[in-house]
Amino acid sequence: DKGLEKSKESIFGRLSRVVIGKTTVDEEVLDELEEILISSDVGVETTVKIIDRIEKRVARDKYTSTGELDRMLREEVAALLTENRSVSISNSFETEQLPKPYVIMVVGVNGVGKTTTIGKLAHQFHQHGKKVVLGAADTFRAAAVDQLKLWGKRVDVPVIEHGMNTDPSAVAFDAVKKGVEIGADVIIIDTAGRLHTKVNLMNELTKIKRVVQKFLPEAPHEVLLVLDGSTGQNAVIQAREFTKATEVTSLAITKLDGTAKGGVVIGISDEFKIPVKYIGVGEGMNDLQVFNREQFVDSLFK
Ligand code: GDP
């Protein structure tokens, strides 16, 4: 599990250093724990929530050894992730339970790993014997269309594109139409993420949805927001903007291989109550994992 190695060392390593020479969980230990959580990008509100809960447990138990801190923290984090529905979705690349075709609209700011995540998803579904169609509706950057085409070639999945500066909703419409025609299981639509023009962003995503629904009224079945886990609070800000612009139904958090700040997953999950479905742990086509709560918590504390 190479990807989460760094986040693992981070919280656990620092926690062990805090409790060295201490026997009980006192105010000072809790203060330091608070600092560790905040600097691990858990977010202030979520950190306060976790510390409060641990404080209550410590107060109730009169004597709480530092050895128990680890377990308490682990339990509280797991509880938060459960409360927020970020539970593991087993075999999520199996689509038998899903409507056919299953349309995923992917949103996110440039550079977060949106195209890469789409490529990885296409690969995983394809590997599971699913028929996949990609729609290159991020038509504002030439590179975006080209990159998606490249991924399509690499993972052997057709890409519907009209080139650059064309109408994104027309591309999305064609991708869905093509998907239905060829009996695709999954249709994944890339979109442009220009946060500096919020109204445009909202209008554009709304229009893509509306046009796609002309062909398939229940689509998109999923709106997947991709966030870069290494950008800490920036990812949180992006999540706020996108959830205002459209109804986000799931999250993919990328680049958790290159950061000691896996804590962002906890904070985001707590603030937005949107399930984290995938995590990106590298640049390769296999470096996408279905988010698994137990595995994630273990990786932070083992
Ligand atoms: P987009 O602009 O959002 O479509 O971003 P790209 O998909 O082009 O990704 C931007 C950069 O991040 C590329 O160099 C990717 O290889 C890299 N990248 C994407 N996901 C991950 C990940 O999970 N881990 C790492 N280390 N790099 C990633």
Image (spheres, rainbow, N blue to C red):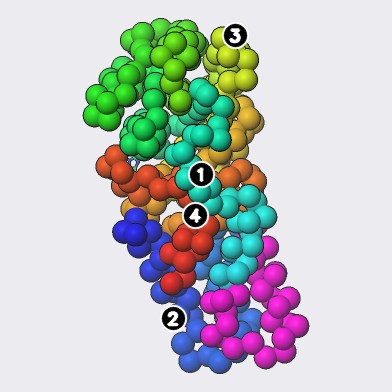
The CA span between labels 1 and 4 is 8 Å
The CA span between labels 2 and 4 is 27 Å
The CA span between labels 1 and 3 is 28 Å
Reading the chain from its start, which is encountered first: label 1 or label 4? 1
Please name which of the two marks, 1 or 2, marks the residue nearer to the observer: 1
Where the C terminus falls, by quadrant? bottom left
Task: Please say if the residues under marks 1 and 3 sit with CB atoms less than 8 Å apart.
Answer: no
Q: Residues within 10 Å of mark 2 (few under 14, many from 20)?
A: few
Residue identifier under label 3: 214
The magenta region covers 45-72
Label 2 beta carbon less than 8 Å to ligand 1 = no
Reading the chain from its start, which is encountered first: label 1 or label 3? 3
Q: Residues within 10 Å of mark 1 (few under 14, many from 20)?
A: many
Q: Amino acid at mark 3?
A: Lys
Residue identifier under label 4: 292
SS assignment at label 1: strand
Q: Amino acid at mark 2?
A: Arg
- Residue 205 vs 261, above or below: the answer is above
SS assignment at label 4: loop
Reading the chain from its start, which is encountered first: label 3 or label 2? 2
Q: Quadrant of residue 26?
A: bottom right
Q: Amino acid at mark 4?
A: Asn
> Residue 17, which numbered label?
2
Residue identifier under label 1: 277
- Residue 302 vs 217, above or below: the answer is below
Residue lying at 52% horizontally and 24% vertically, measured from the top left: 100
